[in-house]
Amino acid sequence: MVKADAVQGESSMRMSKIVRTIADVMFPFAMVFGIYVILHGHLTPGGGFQGGAATASALAMLLVAYGSIDILHRISEHKLTILECAGALIFAGTAAIGLFRTFFYNFLANTGSLFGTYPGYGPNGGDLNTGGVLPIMNIGVGLCVIAGLFAILVIMAYATTVKEPEEKGNGDETKGGH
Amino acid sequence: MNAETILELIYAYTPFACVAALIILGLYCCIVRRNIIKIILGVSVIESGANLFLIAHGYRTGSVAPIYTLSPSDTNPLNYALPIPQALTLTSIVIGVAVAALMLSLAIHIYRKYGTLDVRKITKLKG
Amino acid sequence: MQFVEFISTHAPILILAIPLICAFLTPLVSRISDKARNIFVTCAIALSLATAVLLALDIYANGARTYVFGATSPGIVLPSGMNLPIRIMYEVDGMSIFMVFISLIVALGASIYSWAATDKYTGKDRYYTLLLLMVVGMLGMELTGDIFNMFVFFEILSISSSALTAYYIEGDSAEGGLKYMLLSAIGGLFVLIAITLLYSQYNVLNMAALASSIQYTTLDIVALGILMTGFVMKCGAVPLHMVTPDAYTVSPANITAMLVTASQACLYALFRVSFTLFGKSIIENMTYGTVGIILIVIGVLSMFVGVTMALPQHDVKRLMAYHAVSQTGYMLLGVGVGLAVMGDSSQMDAFGYKAMEGGIFHIINHAMYKGLLFLTAGAMLYMTGTRDLNKMGGLGHKMPWTAGFFIIGALAISGVPPMNGFASKLLIYESVYQFSPLLSIIAMVVSILTLASFVKVFHSAFMGPQLSDYRNAKEVPKSMIVGMCVLAAVIVVFSLFPDWAVKTIVDPAVDALLNNAGYVHNVVGGA
């Protein structure tokens, strides 16, 4: 922290202590909500993208409170790239495992194993253990969106803070999942 | 034509009037405005219009949102609305986020290079 | 044998899945070394191309193939007894596989070329990820049989290609990238609105099922107009061509070559919509003449405006970009004449079929020679550091390979007799002359002006004494030469055996476009 302050000097992007404390307190709740939306993607409105966006906005709250330079001390952009690719690979890989029938074949649904309970017909309370490969794909998309969206936000915040132009690619946020 | 039918017609056509208004407003914004950020906002407004258009077509009178866990327990399963238009809208929103993020980050680079966002002054590429 | 059978069964999706999965593996592979990543990316594209060849052999022998995601049949029976094809499915016919070849061959050349061309830059792992995603976007648009899926891939293509255009922020690339993205985004939203209009009336997104049920109401005509506007916006034809030169000028050369194929993927979507989706209803309502003439007018305007704008340019890539607009006009003219006489079988046999052969053959020729020309322009930029023709000169002494490739490309684009460009242009001239002599004469004049323009480029860049500024210039690195070689080899093959090329790959594509009843039959059945 001290080091980051020294780098930025007077024009620090950190907000006041009140804002930082509130952000610290709210952060776990926002994260839990985002993860809830991801995990319940096959039962309630939402899913990988929506939950990922909620989680990324929780991270964006920290970004606003602490400034991009502090955040980049904690997590490098490189790690976010790896996370993003891992998420996308979970999605595409799960689809590819289904190739013994056809691509995107839901080989876990209604088998009784992981996520394989038969869902009830009509209104019911919902069972998390249904949906076959859908929850797995939601988790993959969620990871991809959290990392991708957060990387875009961090890079944009960093780009507007630092004065000299640096050579930087633009975040790619491309998923064809639907 | 009594008051009730007129009211029904207004209910039925309001979403589509909104769609037309949003799309025309967005196109106007894209064509007439000179500030890059406002042009990007214009694209977002057109996108909202397109999304509203999709979702308005998914509406069915007397239907229930297609969510098993939140619907009343005496819902007839045949009364659920078709979830496809909603899924399409979600996909289109995802794409919209990516497009907006990309265009805004390019706008940042343009602002850094030219010191302005006025399209009349950004004319290196022409002819 | 079982393995070949497996590949053959799943070929339509493997063509797409290989680049998609490799795109996200690229950042991991690039931790090993740069060389490993370069080879990995090229292998991914080559593997996909091999799968496409396998699939093509099957399609030419046994007709169009369908592939359904997640189940074996596209339909689902609702509780009310309705049977709708709701699953996402791919339908691959002669036209699709033809476009897949174009995209993959150019991508192969471009990826080899970029090994050395991006030497001095950093952040290449994401660059290659985006490059592969761009390939995925093009392939998806060309393979899919579902119109919303086509929209999704259209947007993936737009996002990845404009991000690549502006990937290396130098000069005006951010400006070009933003303009490209803006037009693509508006075009994409037009497509989405039209899809909504169709979906709200017929409740299906599957193109075959839509084609069989379209009634050609006023709303459908509006939807056709909006769809065509959306796709024309991105394929770089005239009323909306302003972005094409800007984006092509500033993007890295190998990406420019791929932007050409990206615009052709949108051209494919335009043809698919007007021939397959609306083909039956257009014929039944006798409006094929009107729709065809719209395409012809756009085509002729593109040809003429493109070439006249190209003549005064002194920026080499901008000049070539205007020629790309002009060449797009030839394809629209050829296919437009075919569409204009689609319902009239006597005219169709007399010249319509030949015009379409010319238009479609011109697509692959254009992708190859314009890709090659952009790559040579990139080589000039690599060595001289400028795109300005007035500052270049005498490069022929030091860069014989580049000069040779430039000659091949320039002769092909100007339609000089032995080259492939002549073969496709001759088909267009002959057939269009029977439709309207004036159009044919315009096409020939444009071709002559193209030749004049490229003679100018060759003279000012390669001829003349060596300039002192470029005393140290030498031939570009090997990988760039190999990349150009890939495209030049295709041009030479097509120049030597144009008849073989037309018979083998172009005719199935034309047949696939005209046979919309077959396209529908593969999915819906008896209809």
Image (cartoon, coloured by chain):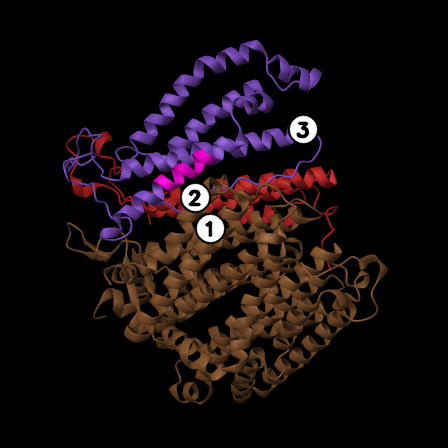
Chain colours: A purple, B red, C brown
Instruction: Check disc 2 and report the residue beneath it.
Output: C25
Can residue A47 be seen from the camera position used here?
Answer: no
Q: Is residue A133 above or below residue C226?
A: above
Q: Amino acid at mark 2?
A: Leu
Instruction: Give the total of numbered labels.
Output: 3
Distance from Cα at disc 3 to Cα at disc 2: 31 Å
Q: Split into 4 quadrants, where in the image is the N terminus of chain C?
A: bottom left
Viewer-proximal residue, C517 or A9? A9
Looking at the rendered structure, the secondary structure element under dot 1 is helix
Q: Amino acid at mark 3?
A: Val
Residue A84 falls inside the magenta stretch? yes
Mark nearest the camera among 2 and 1 is 1
Q: Amino acid at mark 1?
A: Phe
> Is label 2 in contact with label 1 (beta carbons under 8 Å)?
yes
Q: Left or right of C165: which side holds C52?
A: left
Magenta highlight range: A82-90
Distance from Cα at disc 2 to Cα at disc 1: 9 Å
Crowding near pointer 2: few (<14 within 10 Å), some, many (20+)? many
Q: Measuring from the top left, give residue A66's x and y in whole percent.
A: 56, 18
**For residue C40, which numbered disc appears in the image?**
1
Viewer-proximal residue, B3 or C142? C142
Q: Is residue C272 above or below residue C177?
A: below
Q: Left or right of C498: which side holds A14?
A: right
**For residue A162, which numbered disc appears in the image?**
3
Distance from Cα at disc 3 to Cα at disc 1: 35 Å
Looking at the rendered structure, the secondary structure element under dot 2 is helix
Q: Is residue C348 above or below residue A15?
A: below
Chain at numbered mark 1: C
Looking at the rendered structure, the secondary structure element under dot 3 is loop
